[in-house]
Each structure stands twice: as C-alpha cells, then as structure tokens.
Amino acid sequence: MEKDSSFLFAGTHFDRKKFAADIAMFKEKKESDKAIDDSSLFEDREPELEEEEKKVKEKEKEKEKVRVKKRKRKTIRSETVEGFSVFKSSKSEEPVVKEENEQPENDLSLEKKKFYQQLERDALFRKKHNIHVSGNNIPSPLGDFAELSSRFGCKAKLFRNLANLGFKEPTPIQRQAIPVLLSGRECFSCAPTGSGKTLAFVCPILMKLKRASKDGIRAVILCPTRELATQTTRECKRFAEGCKFCIKLMSKQRVKRADLSKFSCDILISTPLRLKLAIRKKHIDLSKVEYLVLDESDKLFELGLLKQIDSVVKACSNPSIVRSLFSATLPDFVEELARTIMHDAVRVIIGRKNTASENVKQKLVFAGSEEGKLLALRQSFAESLNPPVLIFVQSKERAKELHAELVVDNIRVDVIHSDLSQAQRNNAVDNFRAGKTWVLIATDVIARGMDFKGVNCVINYDFPDSTSAYIHRIGRCGRAGRSGEAITLYTEEDVPFLRNIANEMKSSGSEFPSWALGLHKKKWKKHRPRRESISTTPKEKEEPPRKKRKKKAVVGNNQSSMESS
Ligand SMILES: Nc1ncnc2c1ncn2[C@@H]1O[C@H](COP(=O)(O)OP(=O)(O)OP(=O)(O)O)[C@@H](O)[C@H]1O
C-alpha cells in the first residue's frame, strides 16, 4: 500500500500470507490480461479465427476462475484454527466442509454421548457422597483407591502404604480432591474436621513427585502451628514409607543454620513465620516448588499471618506451580483472596460449607458464673470421666489456673499453651496421644488440625471466640467416622453469641435450643470477654506499691510524723 494513500490506513500492514489466494487471483488475472493484450500485436488476422480464439480465451478464463475459486476454498480450510475460521466462511463453502467431516462427526457425537453419560454418572456419584464442585472440566471422583493405580499409575509401594494404614475407602474429600490435583489443577477445598484432608493433599504430591530428587525444594506444605506442622510431617512420612522421599520439617534449628540457599528436599513442611525467616535471612530457594499447600487456609489468611503467606507465595515463583487450599472452614473472603492467586481452580465442598462434623453430639450448658463452671466440671468428672477429654479455655493464664485446680483433684491432667517450651509442648501432645494424660487443658493453639485418635469429649470451658473456632475445637473429637461429644459452657456474657452456636448445632444435625435461634443476631469478631479468675485459692493480698515518700521535716512538723506512723 502506498505510504501516503490515506491517513486512515496509516500503520495498516498488508498481510501477504493471509491474502495469498487473492494475490494469486490478481496475478493470474494480470497474466491472462497481458496475454490478451499481446494478441493485439498480430494485426493481420482472419475474423473467424479471431472469433474462435476469443471463444477459446473465454473458455480459458472460465476454467481459470473455477481453479482460483477452488484454490481459495483450500486456503480457507487451512486457516481454520480450533474450529474457528479466520475468515468468516461464506455459505458456498459449507457443503465441502460437511462432506469431509461426515465420518468424524459421527464419531464426535458418539464421543459427546459418552462424555455426557460420564458427566451424569459423576453427578450422581457426587450427590451420593455429598461432594459439591464448581470449575471447568472437573475430573471424575475416585470410585475407590484402586483407581489411583488404574487411572493415575500409583506406585505399588504407595498403594500398599494406604492398605497398611487400614484405609479401605477414600473419604469424600479424597475422592474428589485427589483426582483434581493429580490432573494438575489448582483447588480450594472445604471438608469437615477429621474427614481426611491431609491424605487428600499429601497423596497427589507423593504420586506426582514420583521419586526422590535432590533438585531443590519440590513441595511446600504450610500449617498455622508448629504442632500441626510436626503432625503433618509425621503423616507424610507414614504415607511415603519405603519410598525414599526426603520429607523435612522447618524446625527452629534449621532456620538458625547459616545458609539455606542449597537446602533441598522433596517435601518441606513449615509454619509461615519460620519459612518467611528462612526466605529473608537464610536465602532458602523456593523457585523450584511444584506444589504449595495452604492447610487451615482460612487461619493462614487471617491478618496476622497474611504478610508471611504473601512472602512465601511470592518466593514460590515456579510458573507451573500447583497451589491448593484446605480447611474445614472457608469464609468468602478467603475464597476471594484465593481466586487472586489461583488459576482455573476447582472448588470442592463436602457437605455444607463451614459446618461442624455430624459425628459430634453437641450440647450447650448454662453455668451461671465462673464459679459455676468449675463446679459443673468437677461434678461431671466425679460422676463419670471418660478419657481422653480436651478442655479449651480462652487464654494461657486461664489454662494455667484451671490446670492448678484440676491437678489437685487426682486427675491425670496436663496443659498446653504458648508459654511452654517446644519440648514441653511436644511432651504434652505425646502424653495425651499415648493415653498417659486423661485430660488436656489447651488454648486454641491445638484447636486446628490436631488428630488425637479417640478423643471422647471436647469441653469448651470458655465460650469460643468465633464460629470457626467452635467448629475446629469440637472437631478434635468425632474424627475418621468415630462419634464424639462436645459440651459448651456459657455464662450471661456469652448469651449474645449463643445464636451462632445454636445455628451451627442445627445445621450439623445436633439437638439445639430453639429459643437461642430467636435471640438477636449478633456478629462477632473476637469474643474474649474479661472473665473472673478460675482460681479458688485466695490470692495473697498484694501490698500496694509503695509511694516514694518525701523526706520529712522532723523539726516542727508533728502532724506529718503522726500520719506516717
Ligand atoms: N480413607 C481413610 N480411611 C480411614 N481413615 C482415614 C482415611 N483418611 C484419613 N483417615 C484418618 O482420619 C483421621 C483424620 O484425618 P485428617 O487429620 O487428615 O483430617 P482433617 O480433615 O485434616 O481434619 P481437620 O480439619 O481437623 O484438620 C486421621 O486419623 C487419618 O489417619
């Protein structure tokens, strides 16, 4: 195109490839025109001959036109990309395409039919297992663990480990989340407490990593507490037994090491703070991480941890990373945040979102006052104590106070809170697991994720500070299909928040006080009222802090000397 032909076409590029057919037609037309022009060079010709020649040329022209048309059709077909024609196809081209696709179209409709049948089967299966999904092209759920081998080529060793652990059937979250992650899709999942979410994310990682490698850090699992990180590390090792994978916990000692830039392992489990320190100060390299799991994701996305999570997510810079989020509670704000970091993620919800486990029988008990709470607890333990029992209180001070009370009652009781050393915390968990401790008093530090087998009863001595805290606390019992009981004590101060708990009881199928549903709706942020001390031993009267006295003027000031005596 002439440069100065029109300002409207300024910058327009003429695509010779795209218009090859038109150019060809144009060229051929020019050539034949040229031939006609050349004939005029022969001036002394007979008129009949000229007439004959004209006819032949006319015929030639017609033939040429047909040939050019055919060539054009061919070009159009070759420029069809994934079913979309680059050129808007004209009606005349349709029959040709149809003719060529007649056989495949039949195959296509058969394929389509099969596809829709599979979708229908999947939908029925999901309905049966209370699995709710959303997203594009969601892989079919697992019918059984054997499909890990038949569909996804699970190695015999891993498969055997599942059997050795006594896992016969996948739980609903495992049925859906495992194939999603194995298909390389990102996923955020919400499933009840104790429903096997750990295996749902560990199993696909182990299967996808295939074999041990020393090429950097390949998978990272973030947990909100050290206790949970320790437990997840132990579980990973159990699932991977005999597979030589290098599975490491980001311990305090490891973070203290001079340089972590060459540190490598197959799976690294950490709390966000420790990993952030390792990134900032020890130059740990997360650029090769292929799988990132945020366990208890709603906790991790709370304000206090968000910055740490952010630095870990940024450090995991591998463009093909697969991220996944798991929790028993998934508030909308977490889903929104999750969408900002995930690509084409699949959403998997088991049962109703944000509900307590149906295996836990829940009770609300009015205790009147702080004194009443202790009395109620003592009485119930005196009548029947069915260990193991977990008691939650709202602060470490109150944990210490309650421990001091119960320890004199001849009960094997222990306490865990953040003032203890790591070794003491580990001991408390281990002794409770081993049955050496009957009653464990705890703050929310172990409310999430901790898997103590066979906890019979959870007592919320102090009312939980949110619905999600309630769900996670009572979820320490009623795990892996077992039943459990949860008792929540409340006083007048807690009444405004009863409605939330009653709602929770109702939606998870427990008996609930219907009057509580009629209470005024109150949104809670963090309900931690100042409560009276638990301690029954009178505190020694503290001496009031001494005021600095002014030096007395002894002489001639009788009044002041009397006062001071
Ligand atoms: N398929 C299975 N069959 C039987 N038991 C299983 C199966 N999968 C997991 N478990 C067991 O169920 C228990 C709970 O699993 P897990 O701790 O993963 O639950 P969770 O959903 O992560 O709970 P939370 O929300 O409290 O973190 C564990 O003891 C685990 O060994």
Image: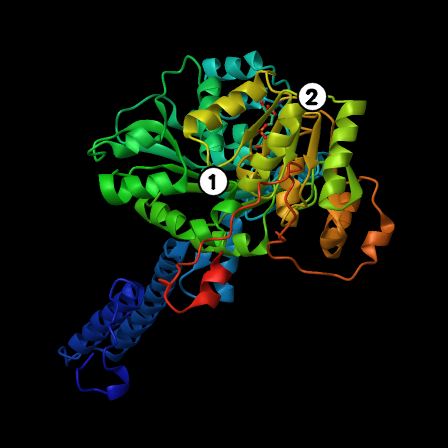
Q: What element carries label 2?
A: loop
Closer to the camera: disc 2 or disc 1? 2
For the point 26% across and 79% down, the residue is: 47
- Nearer-the-camera pick, 508 or 420: 420
User: How far apart are the two marked residues, 2 and 1, measured between alpha carbons?
Assistant: 27 Å
For the point 52% across and 50% down, the residue is: 99
Mark found first going from the N terminus, 2 or 1: 1
Q: Residue 432 carries which label?
A: none
Side (left or right) of 466 relative to 236: right
For the point 59% across and 52% down, the residue is: 331
Q: Is mark 1 on a helix, strand or loop?
A: loop
Q: What residue type is labelled 2?
A: Pro
Q: Which corner quadrant of the image does residue 288 belong to? A: top left
Ligand 1 quadrant assignment:
top right
Q: How is the image coloured?
A: rainbow
Instruction: Name the residue carrying label 1.
Output: 224
Q: Position of residue 72 (x, y in %)?
A: 36, 62
